[in-house]
Structures are given as C-alpha cells and as structure tokens.
Image: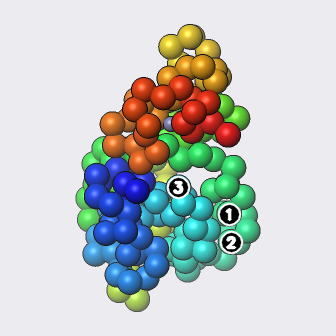
Amino acid sequence: MLCPCGSTLLFNTCCKLFITQKQVPCTAEQLMRSRFSAYATKEGQYIFDTYSATAQLKLSVPEIQVWADECLWLALVVHNSTESMVEFSAYYLVDNTLYELREKSNFTLEQERWCYIDGDIIVHKELISNNGTSTIKRSDICPCNRFPTAWSIKKGKKFKHCCAR
Ligand SMILES: [Zn+2]
Ligand SMILES: [Zn+2]
C-alpha cells in the first residue's frame, strides 16, 4: 500500500516507521505527514501522542479516534513548510461529501521530539463535484482520482467500487 501522506513511497517504508515508533520524525513536515497517515489508518493513539504536552491536556484518545473514524482521508498536499510550520491541504470524505481542510500548523520540539501545537485554518469547505453538487453520486468517478498521489486510488473506478462505504 502507498503511504497516505502522498510521498509515493510504500507505507511500510514511510510513515508507518514513525507510527509504530521504529523511527522518530526528523522534521516538522515528517511529523505532520505521519500524523495525516495516522488519521488515514485510524491510529488515534499516535495522533494523541504527537500533540504537545499542553495540547494533550484538552484532548483524549477516544475523541480523536471518533474524528479519525468518521472521515475517509483521501489525500494530502503540502503547500509549504519551514522549520516549525507546515501549510497543507487535507482532503477527506464524510457522508459522501468531499471536503478540503487547509491549515497552517505549528510544531515544536519537546524532549527532542517534534510535536503539534496548534494550527490556523485557512480553508475548510465542501468541494463541488462535476455534477454541480457537493454530494458524490455512487456512479460518479471516485474523487480520489483527482489526487494522483492518493493512496486509495483505483484509477477510473466509480465511487461505489472505490472509496464509498
Ligand atoms: Zn508517509
Ligand atoms: Zn477512491
């Protein structure tokens, strides 16, 4: 399986190494990508563990797990990154509707590990499909086809045979 983070590497040789704690991300962008992959593979504990200590006080693993489970994470596009900031768009489906969440996320090192502090949402909207509505019909080409690096992609397949549930 391709890595959900869009690196075009295999999941086993990319973000899975971080999620299973075999390696530690060296940069904020690596950490951010691995958090997206953890959402995509529904690893709530990893998402929790990679928040900053202060952010963790206001969160719980079950709460994160609900959000990860509810969404089908389709693709990640990193727009730009600095040492401690990453701006990205995450694309996901809920109730057969495609959403874009574009965020500028802030990261910091805590005990020599990168962690997520918080983010500013730039865009959070429904994306309109070819038929002019935001609801994807089961006979439409699956929206993951819009994202060449989407890990779930089955080229040219109808939604009902691809990412639909
Ligand atoms: Zn990855
Ligand atoms: Zn699909």
Q: Residue at x 40, y 75 (%)?
A: 18
Query: Where in the figure is residue 78, as x and y percent of width and height?
Result: 33, 48
Q: Nearer the viewer, mark 3 or mark 2?
A: 3
Q: Residue at x 40, y 89 (%)?
A: 111
Q: Nearer the viewer, residue 128 or 3?
A: 3
Query: Where in the figure is residue 4, as x and y percent of width and height?
Result: 42, 54
Q: Nearer the viewer, mark 1 or mark 3?
A: 3
Q: Quadrant of the N terminus?
A: bottom left
Q: Residue furthest top?
A: 131
Between the C-alphas of marks 1 and 3, the distance is 11 Å
As helix, strand or loop, the secondary structure at mark 3 comes to helix
With 31 as the anchor, is 26 left or right in this view?
A: left
Mark closest to the chain's N terminus, 3 or 2: 3
Residues under numbered marks 3 and 2 in contact, where contact means CB atoms less than 8 Å apart? no
With 108 as the anchor, is 59 left or right in this view?
A: right
Vertical arrangement, residue 159 with respect to residue 103, above or below: above
Quadrant of the rendered image containing residue 125 = top right
Residues under numbered marks 2 and 1 in contact, where contact means CB atoms less than 8 Å apart? yes
Q: Residue at x 66, y 76 (%)?
A: 57
Query: Amino acid under label 2?
Result: Val
Q: Residue at x 64, y 24 (%)?
A: 138
As helix, strand or loop, the secondary structure at mark 1 comes to helix
Query: Where in the figure is residue 120, as x and y percent of width and height?
Result: 49, 49
Which residue matches tag 2? 61
As helix, strand or loop, the secondary structure at mark 2 comes to helix
Mark 3 is surrounded, within 10 Å at the Cα level, by few (under 14), some (14 to 19) or many (20 or more) other residues, namely many
Mark closest to the chain's N terminus, 1 or 3: 3
Quadrant of the rendered image containing residue 46 = bottom right
Residue 40: assigned label: 3
| CB of mark 1 near ligand 1 (< 8 Å) | no
